[in-house]
Image (cartoon, rainbow, N blue to C red):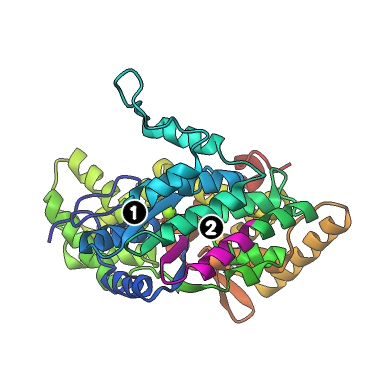
Amino acid sequence: MGLEKAGGNWVEGEDRFFDRDTEIEALTERVRDGTHTLLTAPRRMGKTSLVRELLRRLKDAGDVETIFVDLEDASTPADAIAEIGFQSRAAQGAWGQIKSLFANVLPGEVEIGGRVPVLTDADLRVKLRAGTDAGNWRRKGDEIFEALAGNGRPVALAVDELPILVNRLLKGDDYRITTERKRAADEFLSWLRKNGQTHRGRIGMILSGSVSLEPILQQAGLSAHANIFSPFDLKPWNEETAMACLDALGETYGLDLPCAVRRDMCQRLRCQIPHHVQRFFDILHEDLRRAGRRDATSEDVERVYADGMLGVRGQMDMEHYEGRLRMVLGDGGYRAVLEMLTEAAVNGGRLRGDAIGRHRKSLAAEAGAGNHPPRIEDVLHILEHDGYLERQGDDYRFVSGLLEDWWRARYGRPGAGPDRSAGRWA
Ligand SMILES: Nc1ncnc2c1ncn2[C@@H]1O[C@H](COP(=O)(O)OP(=O)(O)O)[C@@H](O)[C@H]1O
Ligand SMILES: [Mg+2]
């Protein structure tokens, strides 16, 4: 079977989406059962792709209406409600009613001068946003959910990047959890939970995001809000699947990747995160194309890994990881994480228990000095949840060989400490 390269974004469709059959099956069952799902996995594991592909297949099957909402750009509950309303235009049986909720901001569909005014999608979004504010989002949101519940077919409502919104509500621009911010996050999550409960069986929600929701909720003592969502952990591919994926890509692009070569690639990565598998193929493909070759050897794999995956292009990818860590942890926590991961990288991938003890003390000292760093437990929880480290006895260890090598290449060389390359260390 052939497979097309992914480009940078999520993938869907038979010629781009690979494997994940058991996951699709399990999630389909949940949607049909009326179970709400919290899909969790580290960055780039393929959550968005999985949800998009699931919705595509559900839609094809025809018995469920599907809606996909991305909240990455939402800063307030009102933004979120407007976006849910906007994307709900996919549910034909509910859209008329939803439009009527915004009658004050939408032009009536009366003929003006013989013509029905036409709104572009961009205009429509702006208008729905203008019609939703801090005073009415809850009521508008309730009414949108009611309209969706009344849609002929049950609705699968996927909400991506909800944790980013919750994180923003909780921590604002200075990453400090204040009482007021906590109340705002609490209100929004309570609203979501109530609607999930009220319309169970008619609306099935699937939440996902590029940072994990649970550690963020736990940090704020709001974990109970996630109770109605049953977790679903998306795992990395196993080596066999990653090798099959490389084989399928090779077939499409006319590359001969012998079994031993593909195995070397997987062993380099150690953890088969689909995005990393795709990147490795892409960089190898480009490299061989420049040389006018179609066959790859183990030496090629080593060269391409060191120059490409760990080089400038690879590092650009990794900057996203750092950006997300900083967003969740704030400056103080991020600084600690840079040190902890660098220590692990130069120690053969291991962060030792005594090093953790040291960071525990220094974070506590910063808190005592009036700053607001997260607790060491929260930092470790996030690093575990987001797939950086896993626990081994008293120590923690890098999960992904690529992340470990990349971290070492970026921060682990003598004189290349976080102080210089991060630029925001002082
Ligand atoms: N099922 C899949 N088949 C092929 N490639 C995938 C698959 N899932 C993920 N990928 C690769 O991973 C990248 C990131 O996927 P994405 O769905 O955006 O991950 P996430 O939402 O978890 O961050 C894609 O661009 C693609 O290269
Ligand atoms: Mg995603």
| Above or below: residue 205 compared with residue 282 | below
The three-letter amino acid code for the residue at tag 2 is Val
Mark 1 belongs to which amino acid? Gly
> Residue 347 has which mark?
none
**In the image, what residue occupies the spot 38% across and 46% down?**
96
Disc 2 under 8 Å from ligand 1? The reply is: no
Q: What stretch is highlighted in magenta?
A: 188-207
Q: In this view, does 349 lie above or below 114?
A: below
Residue 368 visible in image: yes
Residue neighbourhood size for the residue with mark 2, other residues' Cα within 10 Å, grouped as few (<14), some (14–19), many (≥20):
many
Image position of 273 (left or right of 4): right
Whether the magenta-drawn stretch holds residue 224 is answered as: no
CA neighbours of label 1 inside 10 A, class few (<14), some (14 to 19), many (20+): some
Tag 2 secondary structure: loop
Residue 419: x, y in percent?
67, 44
Q: Give coordinates of residue 323: x percent, y percent.
A: 56, 47
Residue projecting furthest to the top = 113
Outermost residue, right side: 369
Residue at horizontal 37 percent and vertical 70 percent from the top: 31
Tell me the number on the disc at residue 211.
2
Q: Residue 224 location in percent, x, y? A: 64, 72
Q: Can residue 45 be seen in the rendering of this structure?
A: no
Q: How far apart are marks 1 and 2 (CA)?
A: 33 Å
- Quadrant, the C terminus: top right
Residue 93's label in the rendered image is: 1
> Looking at the rendering, in which quadrant would you find the N terminus?
bottom left
